[in-house]
Image (spheres, helix red, strand yellow):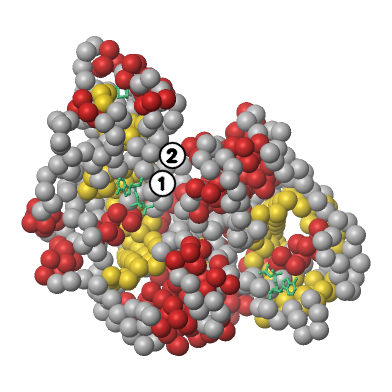
Amino acid sequence: MADDSIAVVDLDRCQPDRCNYECANFCPPNRTGEECIVTREERHDEGEHYAGGPDQISISEELCLGETCGICVEKCPFDAIEIINLPQELDEEPTHRYGENSFALYGLPAPEDGRVTGILGPNGIGKTTAVHILADEITPNLGDFEADPDWERVLEAYRGTALQGYLEDLQEAEVTVARKPQYVDKIPDTFDGKTSELLAGVDERGVADDLTERLGIASVVDQPIDTLSGGELQRVALAATLVRDADFYFLDEITPYLDIGQRVTAARLIQELSADDRSMLVVEHDLAVLDLLADALHVAYGEPGVFGVVTPPKSTKGGINQYLGGYLENENMRIRPEAIEFEEHAPRVEGYGETLVEYPEMRKSYGEGEFALEVDSGEIRENEVLGIVGPNGIGKSTFAKLLAGRLDPDEGSFDARLDISYKPQYVEIDRPMRVDAFLASITDDFGTSYWNTEIAGPLQLDRIMEQQLTDLSGGERQRVAIAACLSEEADLYLLDEPSAHLDVEQRVLATRAIRRYTEAHDKTAMVIDHDIYMIDLLSDRLQVFEGTPAERGHAGRPVGMREGMNAFLSNLDVTFRRDERTGRPRINKPGSQKDREQKNAGEYYYA
Ligand code: ADP
Ligand code: ADP
Ligand code: SF4
């Protein structure tokens, strides 16, 4: 018996009419006559409420031998079973369990009036579940899903913790909640009308005009919602949440599709609202922004879809450092085998430096009075990852089209016509097709051990291969799109915002996949991203775009990381210092001594 393991059956995947109960037939306790895996009908009395069909399986966590056995996990043809040993260090009871053999949440974040509380951790780890509890939409059952929900027991369990005050308030009065959803691309499916109508319907504080101005979306308020770009939708969704008059705001990712300037503005608006004695809870995977934004943070770890643990609050700096280091000190818990390390100078690789392409000075405009781009001459090297930074709407895609020969410059001549494999910022792969069929249609390497090791493994595609493209979550679509881009035969791989909707672990894995792939196969990649950590970890050199979005852009020549970061950050007037312990970049408070010193020295990033 392994009472420290958890068994989760995905009822959407368990299809007993198609498998002959291989799991139960091979389960060692079952073979000695014990009822470890039985049908739900066999386990439960008639009339008793339990989730799932009567023929679907029920696994006894008391009898199960645990993860080291795992025979049923291997036998199930539909990947419906997960058996995971819970960490020994986890000595608490769950806060909530949805039901038998379902996800378990341990701990809860503790929002505080007047503070921004961050949550750092992967998707599928129970963050939304926690918010349902904090909004009084789910009464936590403390793991006993058969008992009637009882807030008194919950209050008793959390007495003396950081959460006691919040939970007591929740009991005494209504806590009003405003939420920003994770996937803003879905907003047009649920709202049909103009931006101004959407905002007018929720503007309880009467600040919509001010917020639209500061977020730079005043020009789109008269447009129908379904004509907005992802970056505009993200800012409209932020405005629509922050104009509400609520006690508790939950913002599930604020940065996808926003450039750095917009990210910093969003962070400031959230901080200002918290200062008005409201509690803000923010899930964010861009660590530089989380660091800037949060007053305290909870790390969430576990096994997505199986169990999640929310730690007690940590300092923002300490929490991020421990997360990157892969070891949570107070919990005595290793969450990743190795640390994520930042190096001051990106590693040089062998063979690096041959020229892939040289291009001349070029100009391109879309017509009289339309957007115009000026490109400095430059070269792209074989086998490098060139990071591309700059605001949205500044001509980055236009530059790529010039390189690909899909656009001709007005001035300058360039006819290399590079074969470019391109992943756009807004991923559009919604076809009635399975993931495996889609990827197999792109490359003959699909399914080879090389492809599995280099692409499918690091991008965690195994569990979604059989799903329909149309059913994928935002992060899953992004990973499939990155895989599709890297699987094409091409001279140059251009990835526009690969970090969007990836959680923080997936960003690390995708970064590694892109780097390893280019290094091992002498490939060249250009990566446009607004996540400074991802750009720092990925890039050998940088190309900086500047100008006035939608009016004029200037593409600098590709330069070294230090020179590039200094040019880019001085445009933004933001400085970063290095954390003394981990070397990770941290945004300086504007006007702080460090900020002033670094600006004087012209060292915006490497001080
Ligand atoms: P996150 O917000 O961190 O992505 P969620 O709280 O949405 O995570 O979900 C955590 C897990 O709980 C997921 O595996 C999800 O499938 C499961 N889950 C969510 N709601 C229910 C439910 N009503 N019944 C059973 N499982 C659920
Ligand atoms: P980025 O990739 O940096 O976001 P783009 O190169 O896509 O920028 O676009 C730069 C500007 O050019 C934007 O204002 C965009 O609306 C405009 N633009 C892009 N393509 C066209 C086109 N075919 N005709 C007119 N304007 C365009
Ligand atoms: Fe049985 Fe547990 Fe082994 Fe699965 S992991 S076969 S339920 S003992």
Label 2, ligand 1: CB separation under 8 Å: no
Q: Which residue is mark 1?
A: 326
Which of the 4 image quadrants contains residue 79? Answer: top left
**Pointer 2 residue:** 337
Q: x, y (%) of residue 593?
A: 46, 79
Callout 1: CB less than 8 Å from ligand 1: no
Rendered residue at 75%/62% (across/down): 400
Count the numbered circles shown: 2
- Near mark 1 (Cα within 10 A), the count class, few <14, some 14-19 or many ≥20, is some
| 2 and 1 marks in contact (CB < 8 Å) | yes
Q: Is residue 217 above or below residue 20?
A: below
Q: Amino acid at mark 1?
A: Gly
Does residue 36 sit above or below 365 in this rendering? above
Q: Is residue 333 above or below residue 249?
A: above
Percent x, y of residue 155: 11, 58
Q: Which mark is residue 87?
A: none
Looking at the image, which residue is at 33% across and 56% down?
A: 128
Which residue appears at 55% of the width and 56% of the height? 499
Of the 4 image quadrants, the one containing the C terminus is bottom right
> Quarter of the image containing the N terminus?
top left
Q: Is residue 108 left or right of residue 585?
A: left
Q: Quadrant of residue 119?
A: bottom left
Q: Is residue 603 above or below residue 388?
A: below
Q: Secondary structure at mark 2?
A: loop
Q: Quadrant of residue 22?
A: top left
**Residue 227's spot in the image, x, y percent?**
58, 72
Q: Is residue 353 visible?
A: no
